[in-house]
Amino acid sequence: EVQLQESGPGLVKPSQSLSLTCSVTGYSITSNYWGWIRKFPGNKMEWMGYISYSGSTSYNPSLKSRISITRDTSKNQFFLQLNSVTTEDTATYYCARYRGITGFDYWGQGVMVTVSS
Amino acid sequence: DVVLTQTPPTLSATIGQSVSISCRSSQSLLHSNGNTYLNWLLQRPGQPPQLLIYLVSRLESGVPNRFSGSGSGTDFTLKISGVEAEDLGVYYCVQSTHAPWTFGGGTKLELK
């Protein structure tokens, strides 16, 4: 069974970088696409970006200057780095698998990140 | 960016009632390859989102057949034929036809 698990600090100071890890079991990240999505307080959801099976990336233009998604295939993990965070980046961050036909079909449990001094 | 407008924002239902949620797109979601990449997700309280429907009307494996999706172009509908208690939560439509991929604002289904 495909399982994803996010990990990382729950509190980040403004202007610093947010770094999260998504650990995947039951499926290789060298297949399909692997993305980050966040849910803000309230219901708003935002797709942040993905890394593909080949290592190519695609980012939401709203974040393009601040975001980086990388991976370690030996550990079957992929990573999110978001620079220069503000309080508006406070959200629950999810990693998910994306398949071309089915879309986001497997999700991690999510990690809540608060940006506060 | 494509804007997905979900209505209603909140839906109150009794167990066994049939309900529908609308998702309207600011532009056609028909891809040049002939597919329409419009999906429906359910997020139950305290849980991550779960895929219910993909490509407008295809039921994800393991999802009860009381859920159905329909629509084309810019207008889409999720129908629940006989709400059960486990269906409560927030429903989202999401499109991946046009970059950046975008989500609707969500519809909260609650018990009346």
Image (cartoon, helix red, strand yellow):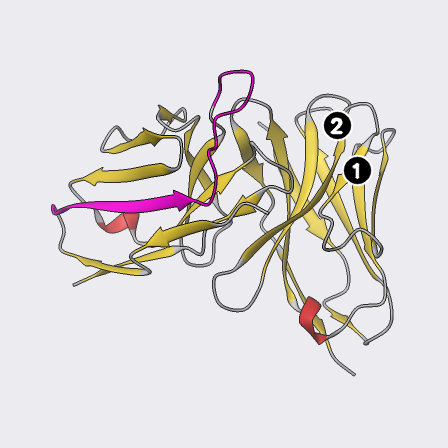
Confirm whether residue B90 shows in the render.
Answer: no
Extreme residue in the front direction: B27
Q: Position of residue A43 (x, y in %)?
A: 47, 61
Q: Which mark is residue A29?
A: 2
Extreme residue in the bottom direction: A117
The magenta segment? B16-35
Q: Position of residue A50 (x, y in %)?
A: 72, 38
Chain assignment, label 2 = A
Please state which amino acid type lies under the numbered disc 2.
Answer: Ile
Q: Position of residue A111 (x, y in %)?
A: 65, 58
Q: Residue at x 41, y 52 (%)?
A: B5
| Camera-nearest residue between B71 and A41 | B71
Mark 1–mark 2 CB contact (< 8 Å):
yes
Confirm whether residue A9 shows in the render.
Answer: yes
Q: Which mark is residue A77?
A: 1
Question: Are both tags, 1 and 2, on one chain?
Answer: yes
- For the N terminus of chain A, the image quarter is top right
Chain assignment, label 1 = A
Q: Is residue B17 above or below residue B13?
A: above
Please state which amino acid type lies under the numbered disc 1.
Answer: Gln
Q: Which mark is residue A27?
A: none
Q: Residue at x 23, y 45 (%)?
A: B20
Q: Position of residue B69 (x, y in %)?
A: 31, 32
The dominant secondary structure in magenta is: loop
